[in-house]
Image: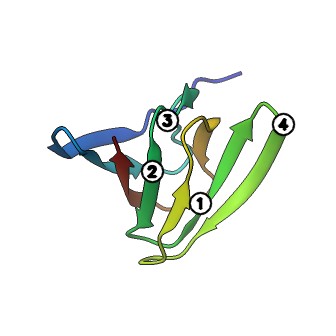
Amino acid sequence: MMSRPKAVPTVQVENDRVIVTEWRLAPGAETGAHRHGYDYVVTPMTDGVLLLETPEGERHAPLVAGQSYFRQAGVKHNVFNASDHEVIFVETEIK
């Protein structure tokens, strides 16, 4: 299996209450497998489709620019950009 390009995270804000990170994923890029330690909100900046590789299997997650969603701490996955263009989203982790 070929290695995938890596997503590019840029932490914009980090304090005792939140971590706000901009994620940029080129076509085919991945975050790498990880577990979320905090509840979080994702705000897509672009439309696109992500492939979520989870312990329960794979599923596609469509992103709509400006349409935020919430997830609870404990989510385990690898996030892969299944779109043919760069996907950008802002993740706000709530400490």
Write the residue at 68% across / 50% down: 51
List x then y, in percent, for residue 37.
Answer: 47, 31
What amino acid is labelled 3 in the image?
Thr
Looking at the rendering, in which quadrant would you find the C terminus? top left
Task: Indicate the amino acid at tag 2.
Answer: Tyr
Q: Is residue 83 above or below residue 57?
A: below
Q: In 3D space, how far apart are the residues under numbered discs 4 and 2 (Cα atoms)? A: 20 Å
**Location of mark 4 (residue):** 56
Given residues 49 and 17, the one toward you in this image is 17
Counting residues from the start of the chain, the first of labels 4 and 3 encountered is 3
Measure how far apart labels 4 and 3 are at the Cα level: 18 Å
Position of residue 38 measured from the top left corner of the image (x, y, whole percent): 44, 39
Q: How crowded is mark 2: few (under 14 residues within 10 Å), some or many (20 or more)?
A: many
Q: Position of residue 57 (x, y in %)?
A: 84, 38
Q: Please tell me which of labels 2 and 3 falls first in the chain.
A: 3
Given this view, does label 1 or label 4 mark the residue nearer the observer?
4
On the rendered structure, is 16 left or right of 57?
Answer: left
Q: Say what secondary structure mark 1 lies in.
A: loop
**Residue at the spot 84% in from the left edge and 36% down from the top edge:** 56
Going by the image, does 68 lie left or right of 18?
right
Q: Say if 85 sits above or below 55 in the image.
A: below
Can you tell which mark lies on residue 16? none
